[in-house]
Amino acid sequence: MIQFRDLHAQYLALKNDIDKGINEVIESSSFILGKQVNALEKELADFVGRKYCVSCGNGTDALVLALKAYNIGPGDAVFTADFTYIASASCAELVGATSILVDINLETFNISPISLEKQIEKVIAEGKLKPKAIVAVDLFGLPADYEEIVKIATKYNLLIVEDAAQGFGGKIREKRACSFGDISCTSFFPAKPLGCYGDGGAIFTDDESIADRLKSLRAGGKSPNDKYDNREIGTNSRLDTIQAAILIPKFHAFKDYEIKNVNEVANLYSSLLEEVVIVPRVPTGYLSSWAQYTILLKNSDERLRVQQALKNNGIPSMIYYPRGMHQQQAFKKYGLEDVDYPNSVEATKRVLSLPMHPYLKKEEIEYICSIIKKEIE
């Protein structure tokens, strides 16, 4: 049976190294912040081109810790995409700031620089909040438009937090995801491009003082040399050693061949489907890590038919996302309306994500595409 993201096939390919790593941790009994955590952090920092990597408990915590490290809080406005997972917006709310939702570019599903500047100007004109940060989401594996985002951030003196929970492994020319902006975050949730076997996350920075503060904040706010002398109120968000031991061989496979493989899968999908649906667009000079392969159907009725046809043939598919952030109960308090998020709303009605992983076989891709073509044509 075709899997949406086949973690079992990946495990079988890496079984010996994963099992060995888990056993070494158990034998050492160093379950929290063991040597594998430090080793993983160094490898990840080197890979993305940052000086420091600080791991943590999950991707949401990574975003919250990043905002805390820069003292973002009450009275501050944090701008992020309306079409994304809630963590990209809830991180601001969790530190007491206000999340300002921004429409997307329908071609890339990432934040629209034009809409971003309009929202910044709107907040400034209202005068109730101080614009402080942009949480730029690398959705579905594709880095956001950082060339334009950096221009806007510079113009308005805003912090850029890269939310690369889905983007780890992507690139813009020779610069890798998790190296954009002032600080970057990713997630190791199992279904992400680089996932562990539980929850996990990481934060990347070039600022030593920020890295030191992050290490303190993830461990209750402890002082560097005395964990019982807490210098501020932090949280308990540490990547456990077993997850680090699992991630190390998975990371080696990821950089050695999995990124290449998922791009070959995406290219085959697009070549087979480009005449019947709108396939994902990767701008020139960009590389996606394909957290999702998401097509656009004509409308919600066509999507429903295609999804049902796939289901009838044992093929899983997912709708990421069925509603924009502004349509969710948690953000109803802001009184936001669909008219301000036309591209986000359009995406919710038409997107469909297909099975996507490095171990997907050519004949499986061809079978999936044949079902879609038959239903549409």
Image (cartoon, grey):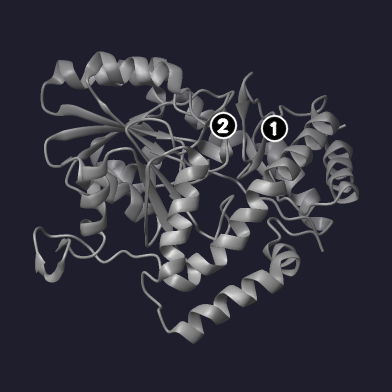
Residue that label 1 marks: 297
Height in image: 173 above or below 375?
above
Residue that label 2 marks: 171
How many residues crowd mark 1 within 10 Å: few (<14), some (14–19), many (20+)? many
How many residues crowd mark 2 within 10 Å: few (<14), some (14–19), many (20+)? many
Q: Residue 12 versus residue 49: which sits nearer the camera?
A: 49
Image location of residue 186, percent across then percent down: 44, 48
Q: CA distance from mark 2 to mark 1?
A: 27 Å
Left or right placement of residue 233 versus residue 154 in this view: left
Image location of residue 5, percent across then percent down: 68, 56
Give the residue drawn at x 86%, y 51%.
364
Of discs 2 and 1, which sits in the foreground? 2
**Which corner quadrant holds the N terminus?**
bottom right
Q: Quadrant of residue 300?
A: top right
Tag 1: amino acid: Leu
Give the residue drawn at x 83%, y 34%.
376
Give the residue drawn at x 89%, y 42%.
370
Q: Earlier in the sequence, mark 2 or mark 1?
A: 2
Height in image: 127 above or below 364?
above
Image location of residue 68, percent across then percent down: 20, 47
Tag 2: amino acid: Lys
Left or right placement of residue 227 versus residue 288 in this view: left
